[in-house]
Amino acid sequence: MRLASLALIGFVMVLAAGAQAQTPQTRVRGTVERLEGQSLTVKTPEGAVMTVALAPNYSIGAVVKASMTDIKTGSFIGVGARPQAGGALMAVQVFIFPEAMRGTGEGHKPWGVLPDSTMTNATVAETVSQVEGGSVTLTYPGGEQKIAIPPEANIMMAAPAQAGDLVAGAQVAMTASRQADGSLRSSRVTIAKQGAQLPL
């Protein structure tokens, strides 16, 4: 298995709104039912059961729960946000990148995961902590964004994981490619550990 930071590249590409895929892509999120060889069966929050074939060299990584105190000036983060009245941005999801992935998907762009949402991958120029949530000012080449981070925002950071973590009950997310025969295939799996919420 590759390093966890590399395993998260697939997840990061979703955060960054990624490049156009050659084959149809499907987001798979839910609870592991079982892993049999390279076949992973997942039950979604809606109750659907999906089976995904894992590539022979698939990679795996984890996200763990983080908080505003983990977001430091100079950190490189990705923030999925929705516009509020008056044009302000409110964070839905925040990912604190490992230092080795600084610069990944840098910039401000539409985020295809949620309607009318944006993704900003950038360096933290300033943080403001409040009793309830806080805000960050993010800078990137050619621009700057100030984004409010409410208490309910999903803040997470990378952590190591291994195939043995894919046990029944584990919370996982991945991007799978739809094959010509209708089956699903993925080369990366992200596990939510230690109370973390699954990434969108």
Image (cartoon, rainbow, N blue to C red):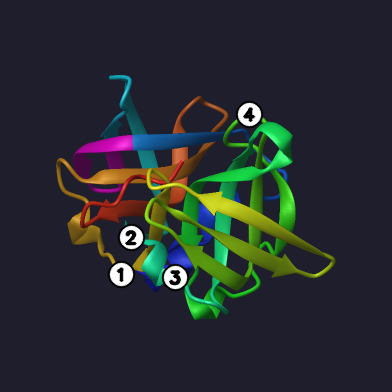
Residue behind mark 3: 5
Q: For residue 115, which numbered disc appears in the image?
A: 4
Residue at image position (43%, 58%) is 130
Secondary structure predominantly adopted by residues drawn in magenta: strand
Residue at image position (67%, 62%) is 105
Residue behind mark 1: 160
Q: Is residue 33 magenta?
A: yes
What percent of the width, then of the height, locates residue 198? 35, 45
Three-letter residue code for mark 2: Ala
Residue behind mark 2: 62
- Chain part drawn in magenta: 30-40
CB of mark 2 within 8 Å of CB of mark 1?
A: yes
Q: What element carries label 1?
A: loop
Three-letter residue code for mark 4: Pro
Q: Does residue 185 lie above or below 193 as drawn?
A: above
Q: Determine whether, in the image, residue 154 is placed left or right of residue 12.
A: left
Residue at image position (34%, 28%) is 50
- Crowd rating for badge 2 (residues with CA inside 10 Å; few <14, some 14–19, many 20+): many
Mark 2–mark 1 Cα distance, whole angstroms, equals 6 Å
Q: Is the N terminus in the top left, top right, bottom left or bottom right quadrant?
A: bottom left
Q: Does residue 139 lie above or below 182 as drawn?
A: below
Q: Does residue 27 lie above or below 141 as drawn?
A: above
